[in-house]
Image: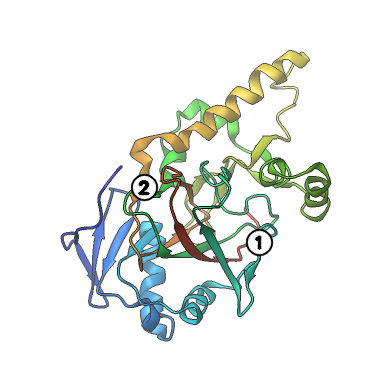
Amino acid sequence: MSIDTRTRPARTDSENAWDVAKLTCTLGAEIVGCRLGEVSRDDAQFADLHRLLLRHKVLFFRDQDLSRAEHVALASRFGALEDHPMVPSDPEHPGLVRIYKDLDSPPERYENAYHSDGSWRDEPAMGAVLHCIECPEVGGDTMWVDMVRAYADLPDAVKQQIDGLHARHSLESTFGATHPAQVRRGLARDYPDAEHPVVRTHPETGDKILYVNSFTTHFVDYHTADRVTNGLDFIEGSAPLLHYLQSRAMVPEYQVRWRWTPGSVAIWDNRCTQHYAVMDYQPGVRRMERAGICGDRPF
């Protein structure tokens, strides 16, 4: 769902003196009256923030005067911060990654795909805090997808078909594909492919989540006697099923779209959402800073 959230939303809920406005029926809320720098230092406010995140899956804030130290402190309340093998952390603030796209930046295309951060890890990210430093006046939005609803809406026959299935997630085949072979092979060595359930369970809410995305390459346990009689059954059965499941992230009814302004912040639960950075602003400047939060092994 596309919403211009530059205007202040109508009040729909209130927690800790904050106005909470849902942006779609199941995904996303804009929080007004919250100062994230204060939340980074206050246990009660953080507890409220955490509850709202579990309820709405992605939270949005405008006009945040958030220092890098506060940014890291806030994200660290959720858990330890992770490093990224392709984008180094800020040297003075470990765990804070600067994603800067300037006028002379190469047209990298790895972000404009529906993905769940770090699903190629054995323990993918729990979530992230993303702060907009500079952005184009128009363009450069980010979209998030509710993968709880994406699973719930699957036909019963498909749910039965994918029950118990596992899939491979790869850094080498995605980020690595944009680099020379020597670098790509090094990534495969240092970050071997991970295997995760196609349907994972949220460790805090118990929700069932469709857990395949653009990092997912294939099913690892599809080739069983009840599914495959001839080799052709595997070829004609598994790849179309995976492509169908990946395409569920493209359904507009499961999406929310956020228009960035300098000082705006998004916090999302990476376990139950995917996101897509819309690269429609080049040539242009888009500078974002992200703190990714370590997660646990999907089950």
Residue at 33% over, 38% down: 253
- Relative to residue 227, is residue 275 depicted above or below? below
Apparent side of residue 174 relative to residue 2 in the rendered image (left or right): right
Count of numbered circles on the image:
2
Circle 2 Cα neighbour tier, 10 Å, few/some/many (<14 / 14–19 / ≥20): some
Q: Secondary structure at mark 2?
A: loop
Q: To which residue does mark 1 refer?
A: 84
Q: CA distance from mark 2 to mark 1?
A: 26 Å
Query: Label 1's element?
Result: loop
- Disc 2 marks a residue whose amino acid type is Gly
Q: Name the residue beneath numbered marker 2.
A: 139
**Type of colouring:** rainbow
What residue appears at the point 41 percent right and 63 percent down from the top-left corner? 134
- Where, by quadrant of the figure, is residue 214 drawn? top right
Horizontal and vertical percent position of residue 201: 55, 51
6 or 42, nearer to the observer: 6
Q: Earlier in the sequence, mark 2 or mark 1?
A: 1
